[in-house]
Amino acid sequence: MGRRLVAQTRIELTLTLRRGESVLLAFAIPMLLLGFFSKVDVLPTGSGRSIDFLFPGVLALAVMSTAMVSLAIATGFERSTGVLKRLGATPLTRAELLGAKTLATVVIEALQVAVLVVEGLILGFRLGGGSIGLAVAGAALATVAFAGIGLLMAGSLPALTTLAAANGLYLVLLLLGGMVIPLSKLPSGLRAVARALPAGALSDVFHGALGQGASVPARSWIVLALWAAIAPVVAALRFRWE
Amino acid sequence: MPAIEVDDLTIAYGMTRAVNRLSFSAAAGEVLALLGPNGAGKTSTVEALEGYRVPASGAVRVLGLDPIADKRRVVPRIGVMLQRGGVHPGIRPLEALRLQAALYPSPEEPEVLLERVGLTHVRRATWRQMSGGEQQRLSLALALIGKPEVAFLDEPSAGVDVSGRQVVRQIVRELAHGGACVVLTTHDLDEAERVADRVVIIDHGHLVTSGTPAELMTVGGGNEIRFGAPPGLDVATLGKALMAAVEELSPGEYRIETPPSPANVAALTAWLAERDLPLADLRAGRHRLEDVFLKLTAITGEVPAVRIDEPAPERRRRHRSGAA
């Protein structure tokens, strides 16, 4: 069990880091957004410094891009090219495959956080009285929720549709997820929708946990927990291996 | 106990029956070729054995086990080569082999296997940069790395060039020699004739016939002579000369219902010589498997859509052969 899990995790990581678009999505885009908008103060990030809003927001974006977009696209193509089918006739179990994908996602997220923390510190972000533990809990719940949504797309749509849908969803949630534009700036109807989505809930958690004296609203935890509970189950029910 | 057993298998996709009450088996150390035109039900049959398809009725057994219910016990002992590689486009040959090796209890050495399938020259290429034939050989290697007791190879020679085919054939023979049962599908009669110990011919999901290539090629061949000559010969006159029924099967393809004795063959060639007619080819006694196939599938009342050789799918990018 251990050997198969390690081998599969290693190959997942190797292949992810070999794909230019994954690296772009996981590292280049979040770093660019963080660097650019913290120096060019054009976003309505309120009276405080831009970096204090942007850093937690971009962390949320990083989690979403890896756990949902990258996972959906990679798994969608593995399904359409028969990779999953072939693995189905080997001793690798579904649990091991899922475990390997989870581990690879967590490792990539850890690398993203490491890179973004260094960049954030250079740009002047300082952790106020926040709680890293709460942020990690939020990231874990969000990873499960996003992975569920990503695998739901990958397992039920054609690969190219998944590619388009995942990228489209990325853009929508980037704008409606409280990552670069505060949710408070959205019109009230849209804001209510945004807060019910996992992206908005995650950025609320990060802003609360890593912000200056802010706290995490209970609503955000409930939203994240519901998505994390429901999305993977729906994905598992709808997943088609071929 | 046979290594694989297909017992009264029916596989249905909605209303259509891809496989209809098919039965056959194969022993350890045996190469069995499932032969039939495209859409005959070969892949469905193999996929039932691999545990991908649930039989509508009937049963399949692999090493005495049910490939779906006993999946965890079956998979370490089988090797599967899918018709469409099923390999990650960005992976390199050794990476794929090492990963696959890590999944099995006592695998082959990846480097050694890479050499055996003749792919050391593309070790730096990724799957998508390899040619169709190279991809097929890597797929074959992936199916064999776990030292399978039963190997299922779906169209292992499709898109492989002549030298690649020899490599594939040799590896299949070696595998059977080592005691494994090899089940391969093909629509290439020549391939089946060269590599298989036993051939199972199926068409429209039905068993047409089975036997060793030698047996199949002598089916009904003991009492006829077949020859090729210009179309439109006067078969009545020829029949009178030979005192046997002569039939033009298709333009330029003739059958004489007479034992292929040297005297009868001599009479035929003499008749042609008198009229200064060329003889394109002459088959007496043994048929080529192709004739058998056409003859037998014609008996089932359907026109077989035989494609003797599938054109090699050209890949977008070829690797540079000097890359290694």
Image (cartoon, rainbow, N blue to C red):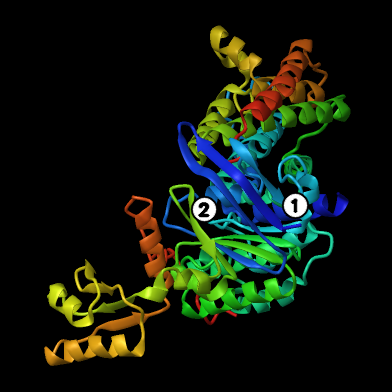
- Give the quadrant of the C terminus of chain B: bottom right
Give SS at disc 1: helix
Quarter where residue A42 is shown: top right
Q: Residues within 10 Å of mark 2 (few under 14, many from 20)?
A: many
Residue B189: x percent and y percent?
45, 68
Please tell me the numbered disc located at residue B75. 1
Residue A53 visible in rendering:
no
User: Residue at left 53%, top 82%?
Assistant: B322
Q: Are marks 2 and 1 in contact (CB under 8 Å)?
A: no
Secondary structure, mark 2, is: helix
- Identify which residue, B278 or B126, lies in the foreground: B278
Residue appearing at x 62%, y 14% in the figure: A184
- The answer to which image quadrant residue A202 occupies is top right
Looking at this view, is B72 or A181 the one in front? B72
Nearer to us of marks 2 and 1 is: 2
Tag 1: residue type? Val
The residue marked by circle 1 belongs to what chain? B
Above or below, comparing residue B4 to residue A133 in the picture: below
Q: Distance between the residues labelled 2 and 1?
A: 20 Å
Front residue of B114/B26: it is B26
Residue A188: give its label. Answer: none
Three-letter code, disc 2? Lys
Task: Looking at the picture, tell me which residue is in the foreground, B183 or B93.
Answer: B183
Pinpoint residue B203: horizontal percent, then vertical percent: 44, 52
Q: Residue B140 appears at what percent x and percent y? A: 62, 66
Among the two numbered marks 2 and 1 on one chain, the one whose residue lies closer to the N terminus: 2
Mark 2 sits on what residue?
Answer: B42
Instruction: Give the residue drawn at x 55%, y 40%.
Output: B11
Residue A18 lies in quadrant: bottom right
Q: Is residue A179 left or right of residue A212?
A: left
